Each structure stands twice: as structure tokens, then as C-alpha cells.
Amino acid sequence: MKHTFWISVAAGLLLVVCDGTTAEAGYCGAANYSCCPASCCAPSGDYCAAKTNCCTCYKMVQEVHWDKQEYTCCKTVYDTICEKKPVTCVRNVYETHYRDCCYTVCKPVYKTCYREVCCQVRRPVYNTCYREVCCKVCKPVYDTCYRDVCYTVCKPVYNTCYRDCCYTVCKPVYKTCYRDVCCTTYKREYETRYRDCCYTVCKPVHTTKTIDVCCGEWKTVTEHCPGPVVCKCVCDPGTWEMDCSGCCVYKPGCCRMVKEQCPGTTICRKIWCPKVCKKTITCTHYVTECKHCRVPYTCVKCIPVCTTKRVPYTTCHYVRECKTCRVPYTTCTMVRQCCKKRVAYRTCRMVTQCIKKKVPYTTCTYKCECIKKKIPYTTCHYVRQCCTKKVPYCVCKQVCETKYVTCTRCVPRQVQVKCTRCVPRVCCKMVPVQVACDPGCCAPSDCAAPQTCCESK
């Protein structure tokens, strides 16, 4: 469709050009084409070959390549060294002492007494009676029946067969060889040196001072505390009533809560009455004194020693060996067999049966009785008793001691480190470039310009 469109457009343009009033317009400026020589209309060559007619030139191009270069630089490395330094400190040592203190205690003595109280109680008397009741019961009766069932069983039959299998075994062959190895060992040399150390000694200095001491006494105070109020549950006597079936039913009385106060208690407690007294005490403080001493220490220096020793090593190569073995395998065939078996099943039917049973019921009557019971009560009286207890008090004493503190310091040293950097390198190379030919390089065309014919036909 595209080619048809362009053909129609070209035909229209040709008609417009040809539609002229003169013969020159119809032949594009020429009278006609019959007066042109035959050499002008001859083919001038292949156009595609003329289009690709160009020459190849070379151009100098620079390229930058980056090469890796190793260089050595110095780097500072810090080594951590630990040293122990003596430090003198004062430690408080606390000692516990005891002094005797007398106090009076009121010890309660409890005694349990009893009093008799008469009260009237209604005691229930229960009687068990029986009545007969008829009821129908459906009783199941089970029967066992049998039926024959046929089924098929597949019975396997096994056969053992053998086949030959070839396999390859790699047998290792070991060989022991020796090589010389240089080893570096280090020999230690010890050297004793001395350094001056300072230490502190504490000397005690005694002084006397007067302090205020609290030395009061304890007084006993007696207080009476009332007893707590307790809620108690009390039940009223019940009644007997007749129900719809004519039986006596016991109906219990109402329960109510009654508050009752318990007996009080007597408490004895002690009150401290302070009293300030003057007391002279001896105080000890310590004065530090610095002293010097020479402390020996040992330095270790390692000296490398190079030695040569023969080290054995083992080489191993494998030798292939072909072997044959008989491998058993089992084949299985299934044989069908028809069997019969008796299958049991149960049948059930219900049989109605009338039975009689006795149903118990209970009757209750009350009987009044007068009983006596003993009610316990507790009496309390206090007995004074003198006791002695040890009261602890603390005494502080300062003790000087020397501790060793580990101090850390960094020692710098220079280490040579290999680093890598990229160095640019410029390379020149010739690159082929496609360049169009000059007009003088191309061959002249055989196609001449159209000639105008002077004579009309």
C-alpha cells in the first residue's frame, strides 16, 4: 500500500510538469530527447559502489592508564604497657562492743476457769419409713448371629536371584619423604635491675576530748486496751410444717448477726527518759611518713637462634583395581487365594418388665432436754521480772594499708607499612578513521549534461 501511494504521487507531479504551453516545458528545458546522443543515456556505474568510495586515515589518540604502585610509609603504633604503683590508703575497721543494760518486764500469767450454765435444747429424733412403688422397666435382650463372608487374599511368593557386579577400588600407596626446614627459636636471658620505690608509714598520735553521752533510763507504763467487737451469727429455733403430700417438713429459723465485745487486755510498755552525761575519751589519729627503698625486678630478653631440622612428610597416590562380586536381589510374585470367615453380629430387642421397689422417707420429731455445760473464761495477772540484756555499740579504728594499682600507659613506635596507590600513564596509539574522498580522487563520470537540440524535428 505504501509503494502504490508514492507511485501515484510521482505520476501526478510528472503530469503537472508535462502540462506546459511549450515543447521546452514538456521536456524539462529540452526540445525533445531524440536529439540527445546515445552516450549520454548510457549507465554511469553502480551508485552504491560510488557511495562507499572513501579512504581510511589514522589519527593519534591518547589514552590514560592507571598503574598500581607500592610505596612504603611509616605509621605510628601505640603499645599499651601496664605497671603496678603502690598507693597508701586508710581503712576504717569497726569493732562491736557490748555493755549490760538492766530492764524490768511485766510478764502476764493466764489462768483458765470454768462456770456451769443450764440451757434447754430441742433434740431432733429421726425415723426412717418405706413405701412400695411400682414402675415399668424396658430391659434390652441381645442375640448373637453369624454370617459367612468371602474375601480374597494376595499371598506373596519371594525368590532370591544373583547377578555379577563389577566395581573399581582405589588402593592408596604411601611414601615417606624428608625435607629440610629452618626453625627459629628464642633463648631467654634474665637480668636483675633495681628501682627506687616510695612507701608511706602511718604513726599513731593520741589526743583526749570530752563528749556528751546519752545515758537515760527506761520507765514502765501500763495501759488497758478494750477487746475487739466480734459479729456472731445466732439462729432462731425452727418449726415443723405439713407439705402438700401430708409429710412433716422441718423449716429452720432465721439467722441474725449479733455484735459481742471480747474482754480487754492490759499492755505494759517502756518509755525512755534521756539524760546527758559528760565523758572523756581518747582519740587516735595517724600521721603519714614517706620512706624509700630499692626494689629488685627482673628483665627478660629473647635472643633468636636459627636451627635446621629434617621434617618427614608422606605422599600418597592411588592404584585402581577392578573387582567382581555377586549381589543378591529378591523378586516377589503375588498369588491370589479365596478365603471364607464367619462374622458375628448382635441383634437387640426390648422387653417390658414391671418391678416393685421400696422408697425410703424420713420423719422427724423434737424432744426437749435440759443440759449443763461448762463455759471457760480466762483471768490474767502480771508478775514483774528483772532482766539484763547486752546493748551493742560500735568503735571505729583506722588502719593504714598499701595497695597496688595497675596503671596503663601508651608507648609509641614507628612501623613501616606497605601502601598501594594508582599512578596515571599516558599511552598514544593510532586509530583508523573513515574519511570521505576528495573530488579529485574520484573518477570522472561518463554522464554528461543534457544537450539542447537546436533543430526541431
Image (tube, grey):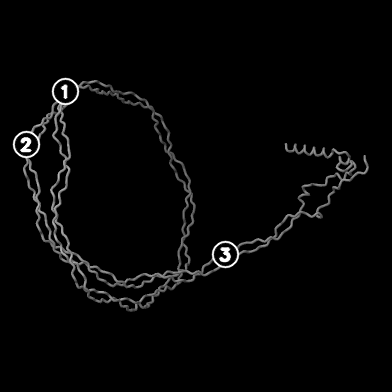
Residue in view at x 21 percent, y 22 percent: 135
Q: Which of marks 2 and 1 is nearer the N terminus?
A: 1
Can I make out residue 33 in this image? no
Task: Tell me which label, 3 or 1, sits earlier in the chain.
Answer: 1
The CA span between labels 2 and 1 is: 39 Å
Q: Which residue is at the front of the view, 265 or 25?
A: 265
Query: Quick check: 175 above or below 309?
Result: above
What residue is shown with label 1? 132
Q: Label 1 is placed on what type of residue?
A: Glu
With 30 as the anchor, is 304 left or right in this view?
left
Going by the numbered disc 3, the residue's amino acid type is Arg
Q: What residue type is labelled 2?
A: Cys
Crowd rating for badge 1 (residues with CA inside 10 Å; few <14, some 14–19, many 20+) = few
80 vs 342, nearest the viewer: 80
Seen in the picture, residue 241 relative to 370 is either above or below; the reply is above
The answer to whether residue 413 of the structure is visible from this angle is: yes
Q: What element carries label 1?
A: strand
- Comes first in the chain, label 3 or label 2: 2
- The residue closer to the viewer here, 109 or 173, is 109
| Residue 122: image location, x then y, percent | 10, 34
Q: Is residue 429 left or right of 387 when viewed as pictured?
A: right
Q: Residue 370 carries which label?
A: 2
Residue 435 is tagged as none
Relative to 356, residue 45 above or below:
below
